[in-house]
Image (spheres, helix red, strand yellow):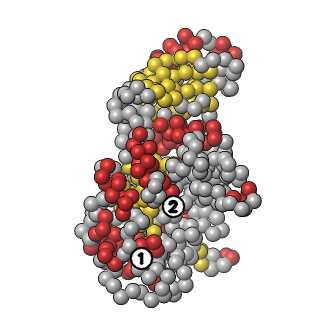
Amino acid sequence: MTLLRRLLPAALLVALLAAVPAAHAKTNQEVTFEAPRDFFDPGQREAAFQTLDGLGVHAIRVVLYWDDVAPDHNSRARPKVDLTDPASYDWGTYQPVLDEAHARGWAVQLTVSGPVPRWATNGARNHVTRPRPSDFESFMTAVARQYRDQVTRWAIWNEPNHPQFLKPQYVGHGRHKRPASPAIYRKLYAAALDGLKAAGDDKPVLMGETAPMGTGKDVAPLTFLRGALCLNSHYKQHGHCGRLRVDGYAHHAYTTRKGPKFKPVGKNNVTIGVLSRLTKALDRAARAHVVTAHLPVYLTEFGIQSKPDPIYGVSLRRQAEYRSYSEWLSWVNPRVAAFSQYLLTDDPPEKGKPKLLRYGGFESGLRLATGKDKPALAGFRLPLVVRDVHRRASLWGLVRPASGSTTVVVQVRDPHRKWKKLATVRTNSHGVWTRHGSLGSRKRTWRVLWKAPDGTRYKTPPTHAM
């Protein structure tokens, strides 16, 4: 049977592709972009917004670090100013970005996070250890008063289960070691809700923004979730915690070089390939009456790291394939309300360091640090996924800039042969299409061609079945 499928003529394959009607899991998933290197550079900002506009992106995530805007942020003594007054803070770095997004009518998620001013921590030892909830409540009031007309939704803290943003993650040693950050975060989250209420702001608020993996230094995301919601390992309430308002749960579902199908061993870790772990945990939390049922999931930071990073990076071709497959995983999950892309342009390498140490930032951008486009840029505009489903090809695609139904041309190429047209496919009103057909050789590649309304022609990078 396998040999027969490989020998199927192109005409029959076209018929197979056309025979199965498209099925679309959802129509309302938001695609959010985060590009701090480009947005915060006055010389790059306008071009970055124009690029994203051309890619069909109209929603951004901005992480606002408390320490960046606070008065006397390195002082141990709290400044004698009204900390609920926006005039007490310096918003200069962030204001132009939010102004630009607002002028374009784009959605903005503002994640308010540590590091924090030294004076706002218990003991004033550093900028991340035990931030004081009362000071954070005042800060959230000031933030909401400053940006109430420019923000679509709020998120509280960036990766609070990571010691770079919140300490301590654990207390105790050996057998007595236990997570500390979930309880600290819960108080900060509750303070944020109070601060927003004081400012008269009732926009949606996201909990979490958790990093994907637990280590000896990071608390695993599901362990963190349970602790922040006052649940034990069996998802039963403990202590005397009241119910907090949670409008959605945010998570950073990064994976490893093994790609989006990777399944981490630790049951409390959540990468893109095991999103069901998170939704099941939220469902169990709902049954414990600490959050609402069917709480939406927001994948607020995600990307696939590529070469030239020699440690974490995959090939440029793989980056495009893995990113598209990851987006498909989020699309077919009905609980995922938003999917993100972290970085337009890679972080620059650190000059003068050995190659293995040169890439300490992120190489998850759609462009190299030099500004050269990666295949992932074309793949972001026209995501294409080809799955091997019982030796048949299941195709999913999206025309990112489409504002309505459009058509794409699906092509296939066998090794050492030219590209052949398989079908012209009509998308739905959101630019999504699906088809099924013969898989053929494992070395076969697929691509999609699309002609924009202005006549510009685009194509995806060659894609292999996964």
In the rendered view, tell whether residue 361 sits above or below residue 339. Answer: below
Residue 84, position in %: x, y?
Answer: 31, 77
Where does the C terminus fall, quadrant-wise?
top right
Q: Determine which residue is flagged by label 2.
A: 210
In the structure shown, which secondary structural element does the residue marked by tag 1 occupy?
A: loop
Q: Is residue 301 left or right of residue 176?
A: left
Measure how far apart labels 1 and 2 are at the Cα level.
24 Å
Q: Nearer the viewer, residue 78 or 240?
A: 78
Residue 223, position in %: x, y?
Answer: 54, 64
Q: Amino acid at mark 1?
A: Ala
Number of marks in the rendered image? 2
Residues at marks 1 and 2 touching, judged by CB atoms closer than 8 Å: no
Is any atom of residue 32 visible in this view?
A: no
Q: Residues within 10 Å of mark 1 (few under 14, many from 20)?
A: many
In the structure shown, which secondary structural element does the residue marked by tag 2 occupy?
A: strand
Q: Residues within 10 Å of mark 2 (few under 14, many from 20)?
A: many
Q: Residue furthest front?
A: 43
Q: Amino acid at mark 2?
A: Thr
Q: Determine which residue is flagged by label 1.
A: 70
Front position among marks 1 and 2: 1
Is any atom of residue 99 visible in this view?
A: yes
Q: Is residue 119 left or right of residue 200?
A: right
Q: Nearer the viewer, residue 60 or 458?
A: 458
In the rendered view, tell whether residue 279 sits above or below residue 27. Answer: below
Rendered residue at 46%/27% (across/down): 457
Q: Is residue 350 left or right of residue 61?
A: right
Q: Which mark is residue 219?
A: none
Rendered residue at 55%/21% (across/down): 411
In the rendered view, tell whether residue 82 sits above or below residue 335. Answer: below
Give the mark, 1 or 2, whose residue is nearer the N terminus.
1
Rendered residue at 56%/41% (across/down): 373
